[in-house]
Amino acid sequence: MTILLTMLYPVVTVLILLLQAVQHSHRPMSLLGVLHSAATLLITILLIGTPDAWKGGEPLFMIDHLNLLLMLITGVIFTCASIYAVGYIDGLVRAGELNRRSLRIFYLGFSLLLFATTMAYYAPNVAQFWIFAELTTVFSALLVAILAVKENIDASLKYIFVCSTSMLFSFIGVIFLFELVRQKTGTGSLDWQTILANASTCDSGMLGIACIFCFIGFAAKSGIVPLHTWLPEAHAKAPSAVSAVLSGAILNVGMYGIIRIAGIVHQTTIATQISLLFIIFGMITMSVACFSMLRQNGTKRLIAFSSIENMGFLLLVSGIGTPVALFWMLYHMMGHSVVKAGLFFSAGIIHRQYKSHTPGAEDEIGDLFRMQPFAAAAFIIGSVAIIGTPLFPLFLSKFGILLEAGKLSLYIPLLALLLFALAGAAMFRFILGIMGRRFADGEAPVQYIVPIWMKAPVVFLLALSVLMGIMMIPGEEAFLTAAVHDIGIGGGV
């Protein structure tokens, strides 16, 4: 049963790619993209609903609660982004910003990115994970550069250079891990489960070095300082449907690698030292991101730095490393992905309304509630949600994590609260700035008519974030607790 369901991922991908390759108009290609994302989400839900089928193990794929959780997030974000793209990409084509000849490249790249992300999560060993994580960089960069303007191409090349160079260090770490396991078992192995099972008997010093090398590449994929420099440009310049995917789904790929490494390290005597490293870099990342947010005047760049802040917070939690902290970390990943995708979708509507015709210039936003009341309201609600306000999921996760961090040191929650306050101030400084601007008579741009394809995903994600903030569905707590156990750290809430 498991092999049949998991093989549906590549089978569906191949069928969709073949059908997209022979299409000549936008609508069929975009609807095939929606079908691919929805099918991926449906397969993931079926796997979650049949745990007895995959708990016995599967040679081609590693399936557990952790990667199923992240695949569920990925499926939701890609499905919403593909629906949003039906209207958004059509607008880019009509405006002449996207060449019709590039449509096929966009949708093929979008489908390949979804497949590479899926295979990265289900990879049974760290080498396959490394390969598919690298492929997500390639396909993401293609989508960033799809508009074929200088700023986008520069952002795409920077993305590839920083991430791929950093991933070379991870490759060195992979070699070290293979040799460490070979010394213990006689036959080298890169299986996640084999490394986890033998970590406690490996040389702690060498294992620590291997994990640090792996961390460098995975940190770049997640936008951790100082390897974050690609992220603001790539997320800001990419089409908004792509920005939502990058922030809501692709950043999680790097964080998934860090989580797996954290689980391995916690089996050894150097767990304290590596945890301290994660905490330090998490705090530095949050600090750089929050102070950078105060200086931003562009909508998407502001949201991009918010993503860096949240990735830093997740790294901080990886350093805390208790079962309760990791439980809320996974909950935070779900909440962040849902809210951040909704924010980028709202920003995309605002960008279509006020796009500057000067290359590199920020949009001149004014009369926002009159010109785009839906996007204005959605952006404000999303901003309230992303800073961790009650009734939204990030409030619960931040509250639970800070309580757990206080057991380690009171300085951690105090500094984190200060940084959260800075991030909140930056968001509302920006909102108050754009809300107060007015156009003189006759200077306002023509109102952009927002297609229902672009509104529906925003409404769904905002409603989902409220639902996540006020209740847990039956079985959710048990599933998250099992995911924490799959990391290699037992326990629960």
Image (tube, rainbow, N blue to C red):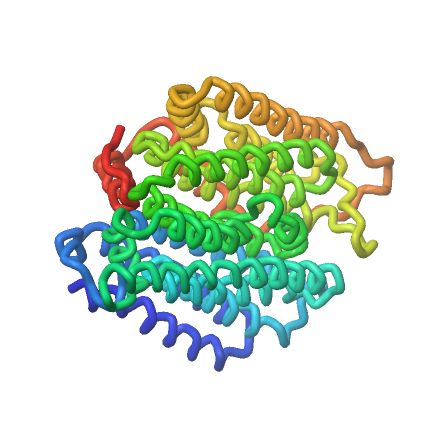
Residue 379 falls left or right of residue 125: right
Above or below for 89 versus 280:
below
Q: Residue at 55%, 62% (x, y): give it.
A: 140
Q: Residue at 49%, 48% (x, y): give it.
A: 248
Image position, residue 466 (x, y; %):
42, 31
> Observer-nearest residue: 146 or 56?
56
Image position, residue 402 (x, y; %):
43, 23
Residue 102 falls left or right of residue 440: left
Image position, residue 122 (x, y; %):
32, 60
Above or below for 461 versus 122:
above
Displayed quadrant of residue 268 = top left
Q: Residue at 66%, 64% (x, y): give it.
A: 157
Residue 249 falls left or right of residue 194: right
Residue 184 falls left or right of residue 366: left
Image position, residue 298 (x, y; %):
71, 42
Residue 247 visible in rendering: yes
> Observer-nearest residue: 216 or 137?
216
Residue found farthest to the bottom: 22
Total tally of numbered discs in the picture: 0
Quarter of the image with the N terminus is bottom left
Q: Residue at 27%, 28% (x, y): give it.
A: 493
Above or below for 217 versus 458:
below
Residue 27 visible in rendering: no
